[in-house]
Image: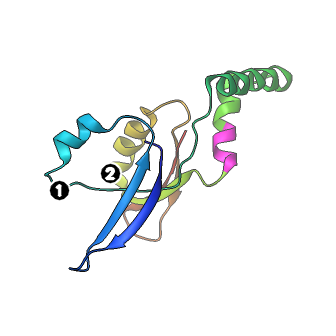
Amino acid sequence: MKGKIQSLNISLDGKQILTLQIDGDFRSQYNELSERNIEVTIKPYKPKRSLDANAYFWTLCGVLAEKLNKRTSEIYKELIIDIGGNHDIVCVKEDAVKSLTDAWARNGLGWQTVILDSKIQGCKNVVLYYG
């Protein structure tokens, strides 16, 4: 949900009170959650790519694929790895690598893995790319 931080106040008991201004209707969630403990995550808003931008991206991948004599999906996968800043690296026991990589790939076409050696015996480092 998109919004802005409106204010931050400190109550007499030292607790912080954060007021948010949000886009959209939160009333139904408020009634359900108002008396419960909740988990809160706040991060900078990142607009989603529009459907037009997404279609244009795939058109460009198709043009590149034709010129380079590759499949469009191959171009896309190469770009995911080349982008940077879109991966995590985890150390995994060798016998768990296949199940992790299989599960990761089920997220979508661009969700790829690269397996690297680890300094820890019996483990591998797995680079998890977000598609």
Residue type indicated by callout 1? Asn
Position of residue 14 relative to residue 92, above or below, is below
Residue 55 or 97: which is nearer the viewer?
55
Give the residue pinned by disc 2. Answer: 95
Residue 37 or 54: which is nearer the viewer?
37
| Residue at (27, 37) in percent of width and height | 27
* Residue 21: % across, % down: 43, 49
| Residue at (81, 21) in percent of width and height | 63
Q: Does the magenta stretch include residue 70?
A: no
> Going by the image, does 68 lie left or right of 21?
right
Q: Quadrant of the C terminus?
A: top right
**Coloration of the structure image:** rainbow
SS type, badge 1: loop
Q: Which quarter of the figure has residue 79?
A: top right
Q: Which quarter of the figure has residue 31?
A: top left
Q: Is residue 126 visible?
A: yes
Q: Is residue 71 visible?
A: no
Q: Quadrant of the N terminus?
A: top left
Which span of residues is magenta-colored?
A: 78-83
Residue 106: mark in rendering: none
Which residue appears farthest toward the right when viewing the image? 67
Position of residue 17 relative to residue 56, above or below, is below
Residue type indicated by callout 2? Asp
Position of residue 27 relative to residue 21, above or below, is above
In primary-sequence order, the first of circles 1 and 2 is: 1
| Residue at (24, 43) in percent of width and height | 30
Residue 42 or 59: which is nearer the viewer?
42
Crowding around mark 1 (Cα neighbors within 10 Å: few <14, some 14 to 19, many 20+) is few
Give the residue pinned by disc 1. Answer: 37
Question: Cβ–Cβ below 8 Å for labels 1 and 2?
Answer: no
